[in-house]
Amino acid sequence: MASLLRSRPRLLTAAALVLGASLALSACSSSGDGGSEGAAKVVRPASTSKYQGTVLNKHFDKPDLVLDDTSGQPYDLRARTAGRTVLLFFGYTSCPDVCPTTMGDIGVAMSKLTAEQRQKLDIVFVSTDPQRDTPQVLRTWLDSMGKDFVGLTGDLAKVKAAAKPLGILVEDPVVDAKGAVTSTHGAQVLAFLPADDKAHLLYMSGTATGVYQHDLALLADGVAV
């Protein structure tokens, strides 16, 4: 009998983001000081910001990550997306709730943009269940949401190491006595800007399609955060 996969995403409330930022988004400083300045904090969009997503006051480096893409070829995330706007999400194809909802909402938002705007955006999905998410499985799943979406799969240790500095938790899948597999993963989407290849915006699980549509249009048009 095929194993049943269940998702248990780690979600953070708005209050947790504001009051517990050092826990929700920790070890994000590339400076290595280890002091209080290294603790990442999240702020609500400033009154001067045109964006509806959460504005980060510390900008996270894009992960140094090389995995297989959906054609089975090595994909260097930093090199292939350098100087481009990137939305990055960690999840898995058998997730029954947050993963298809999040990627589906982004897909709908992308479909509302012009072809020129879409060409300026990279949507990257990194699998937290690489044993089951083969390149072929990942491509079929992503095609239902966006045929241009990038899917990456491979060594889970690399995935966990890439997610950790972003404050995104990824745990090893757990199999219970009945053979059911639970994959626990963070549900945050991060937007990296082309000017410095760092994350400037965060979107939590449940972000409305309209918010993505609004912000993706601004990102594609190069509007400053």
Image: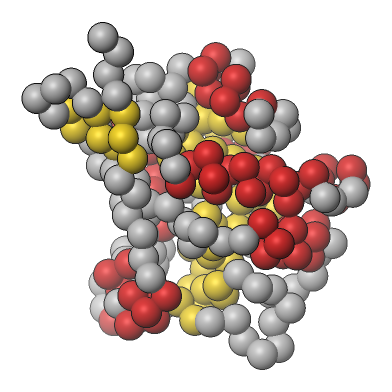
- The part of the image, by quadrant, that contains residue 175 is top left
> What residue appears at the point 63 percent right and 49 percent down from the top-left corner?
105
Vertical position of residue 134 compared to residue 164: above or below? above
Residue 180 higher or lower than 224, as above or below: above
Q: Give residue 201's position: percent from left, percent from top.
A: 58, 66
Residue 10 appears in the figure: yes
Please indicate whether residue 214 sits to the left or right of residue 70 in the image. right
The structure's colour scheme is: secondary structure
Looking at the rendered structure, the number of numbered marks drawn on it comes to 0
Q: Nearer the viewer, residue 97 or 152?
A: 97
**Dividing the image into 4 quarters, which one contains the C terminus?**
bottom right
Residue furthest out toward the top: 1
Q: Residue at position x 69%, y 43% from top?
A: 107
The quarter in which the N terminus is drawn is: top left
State the image quarter where residue 18 is shown. Answer: bottom left
Residue extending farthest to the bottom is: 47
Tell whether 219 sits left or right of 143: right
Quarter of the image holding residue 34? bottom left
Which residue does the image show at 24% across and 28% down from the upper left? 181
Q: Residue at x 69, y 82 (%)?
A: 49
Q: Position of residue 61 (x, y in %)?
A: 50, 58
Residue 194 visible in the current orientation: no
Name the foreground residue: 178 vs 218: 178
- Residue lying furthest left in this view? 177
* 155 relative to 149 in the view: left or right: left
Pick the residue in front: 214 or 208: 208
Q: Is residue 42 above or below residue 220?
A: below
Question: How far from the left and from the top, in percent, is residue 80?
Answer: 65, 37
